[in-house]
Image: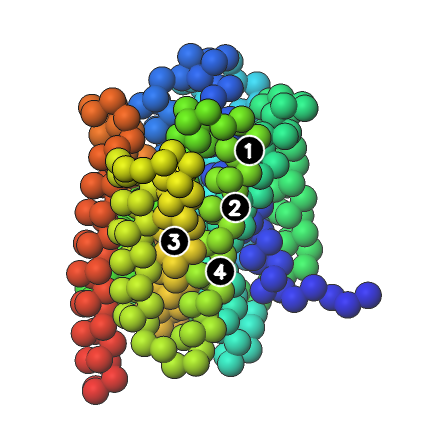
Amino acid sequence: MRKIDPAILVVLGGVSAALHVGKLPTALPVLQETLGVTLVEAGFLLSLVQLAGMTLGLLVGLAADQLGTKRTMVWGLAIVSVASLLGAGATDTATLMVLRAAEGFGFLLASMPAPGLIRRLVDPSRITLSLGLWGAYMPIGTAMALLFGPLAIAWIGWHAWWVLLGAISAAMCAWLWLVIPADDIADRPDESPGRNGWPQRLRITLSAQGPWLMALSFAFYSSQWLAVIGFLPSVYTQGGLAPALAGAATAFAAAVNIVGNVAAGRLLHRGIKPQRLLYAGFLAMAAGGFLTFAALPGDPAVVALIRFAGVLLFSMIGGLIPGTLFSLAVRVSPGERTISTTMGWMQQWSAFGQFLGPPAVAWVAMRVGGWTWSWLVTAGCAFAGIATAFMVGRLLQKHHTE
């Protein structure tokens, strides 16, 4: 029997963690009915999974550089699993929110060290392609949860759905622990504390321009992606679609993001400039967000098709952004022992964007009595991302000439 590629196993571990991000959107109608969750509370339930990343991303990155990428990822999957199993017994919104935050901490531990772990496991000639594949872990997990969530909730209830996903993460935790080699960076002989201690790694990372640009770019991307994909089931359900159909449509919208992520790795491998991919991704998200939410004249059936096309444009071409940023982050990291720290900083800002994005879109929707003007939030993030992409291009050009 052929052994599984360890890098693929790392991606599968990320997918099992991302399932917990995607499990909530299709459950929101049921949670609103059974637990009395309000629209704004729903927005925070969507974004609370990012609370740990928003507050602890950099610290966890520093710890992972010291403790080891494999151990950090395994612990993350274990925490996600336990939090999901406990969440199955939640009977009120407050408890669910607390456990959602715990899931976020586990998700941070499971996802943040993965690019550095992949870099250790794969041949240098495959790094760009492998990191492009890693960039698809979130849309793959989200799409699977959105696709199967409505069916599972209808058949076994949301409590059992939480238990099932917790069991999947536990299984991946054990698989990673048994298969991934244990020779992490942290397992090498300790180097000089003055040169490689965490204060020094922190100073080196935060004084470099590259980690900041990666972090801001990811924040501008992630805030609008989670806001749009997270609320699509509710938008479609309010538009008259059955929950299962709304979930399937949203799952497809999330799944096409995989195309952009994988394409980014291949295009970078062929020599396409990273800033061009970032420009294309953010422009597509600006246009797609407008088509998704804006008031469009015409036949309702035609408008519905245009909106769905806008969602696909938003997600698929927007997928170029994370695939590009994961590859760039490894390149612009100030040093070998700051890769996880750089990823942690990027994850922290990504989580900050995801924490604010859904509540901002929900707040605008509540203020105007519908989703019509929500595109202003996504467009603002997109154009800020374009400005950051310009600065990324300047930085890469400077590195090329040095």
| Between marks 3 and 4 in the image, the one whose residue lies nearer the viewer | 3
- Which badge, 2 or 4, is on the more N-terminal residue? 2
Amino acid type, callout 3: Leu
Amino acid type, callout 4: Val
- Which badge, 1 or 2, is on the more N-terminal residue? 1
Say which of 110 and 44 sits in front: 44
If the image is split into quadrants, where does the N terminus sit? Answer: bottom right
- Gap in Å between the C-alphas at discs 1 and 3? 20 Å
| Number of numbered markers | 4
Residue 136: x, y in percent?
A: 49, 56
- Which badge, 3 or 4, is on the more N-terminal residue? 4
Label 4: which secondary element: helix
Label 1: which secondary element: helix
Q: Which residue is mark 3?
A: 313
Residue 323: x, y in percent?
A: 42, 63
- Which residue shows up at 23% across the image and 73% down it? 393
Q: Which residue is mark 4?
A: 259
- Which badge, 1 or 4, is on the more N-terminal residue? 1
- Which residue shows up at 25% across the image and 22% down it? 369
- Which residue shows up at 31% across the image and 64% down it? 280
Q: Are marks 2 and 4 in contact (CB under 8 Å)?
A: no
Determine which quarter of the picture holds residue 2. Answer: bottom right
- Which residue shows up at 36% across the image and 78% down it? 272
Q: Are marks 1 and 4 in contact (CB under 8 Å)?
A: no
Q: Which residue is mark 1?
A: 245
